[in-house]
Amino acid sequence: MDAIPPGLRERKKLQTRKALARAAIRLFAEQGYATTTIDDIAAAANVSRRTFFRYFRSKDEVFIVDPEGKLEAVHVVLAEGPVGEHTLDKLRRAMLAITEIYWDPELSRAIVALVAREPEVAAAARVYQARFAEQLEHELATDMETDARLDPRPRILAHAAVALARSAVAGWLLDSEGEDGTPVDRAIVAFDRGRPMLEAIVALPVGHS
């Protein structure tokens, strides 16, 4: 798989983001999401309030770990991929890269549990998922050289890709033994098996008026 290997500086930033996320999730579990403050999270992660805001705009973003980085990873793959590479190949690489870079078993399980018991966190997760799908739709429309306002294919492709990636991660989380490899392995299988569906979406007739 040709993913996006993060540089040393990016890896250190991601480590700090994960440390903040772990601290936040631990506090959310102990004292509740609503009563946990940004100062609480910063103190638990041994960083300053200013450092917190260097990585996150709000408490709602902490459990997403790296919202802007995920969007940037998608842009890099789709906008800067090899000349002539098929959109679906770029889409596959983008989703696999995100799965590989951001996968953390312990943190992911904690986030799933948190979303299940905290309505506010679940709502924030849905907002970001919608934002991610919208950005992915925009990137796909640009790569396909089409207008997403008139062409539904980029939107359908974006949501289908997100569903494939999420199903792979969810399947891994449900498998406590992890016998079928990592979430990345499962995402590869999901995208390869889902390729005919994605190709059918690309082949949909588009009527511009």
Image (cartoon, rainbow, N blue to C red):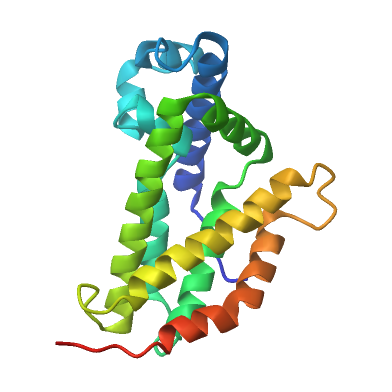
Q: Quadrant of residue 41?
A: top left
The residue sitting at 37% across, 58% down in the picture is 133
Q: Residue 174: image x %, image y %?
A: 74, 45
Q: Nearer the viewer, residue 55 or 152?
A: 152
Q: Judge whether 16 appears above or below 73 on screen.
A: above
Q: Judge whether 165 appears above or below 145 on screen.
A: above
Q: Judge whether 30 appears above or below 183 on screen.
A: above
Q: Judge whether 25 appears above or below 96 on screen.
A: above
Q: Residue 158: image x %, image y %?
A: 41, 66
Q: Nearer the viewer, residue 150 or 40?
A: 150
Task: Indicate left or right for 115 with 171 as reference.
Answer: left
The residue sitting at 49% across, 40% down in the picture is 14
Q: Quadrant of residue 194?
A: bottom right
Which quadrant of the figure contains the C terminus? bottom left
Task: Indicate left or right for 186 with 79 as reference.
Answer: right
- From where the camera sits, is residue 84 visible? yes
Which quadrant of the figure contains the N terminus? bottom right
Task: Indicate left or right for 2 with 185 as reference.
Answer: left
Q: Residue 93: image x %, image y %?
A: 52, 70
- From where the camera sits, is residue 5 visible? no
Task: Indicate left or right for 155 with 111 as reference.
Answer: left
The residue sitting at 19% across, 87% down in the picture is 208
Q: Residue 142: image x %, image y %?
A: 27, 76
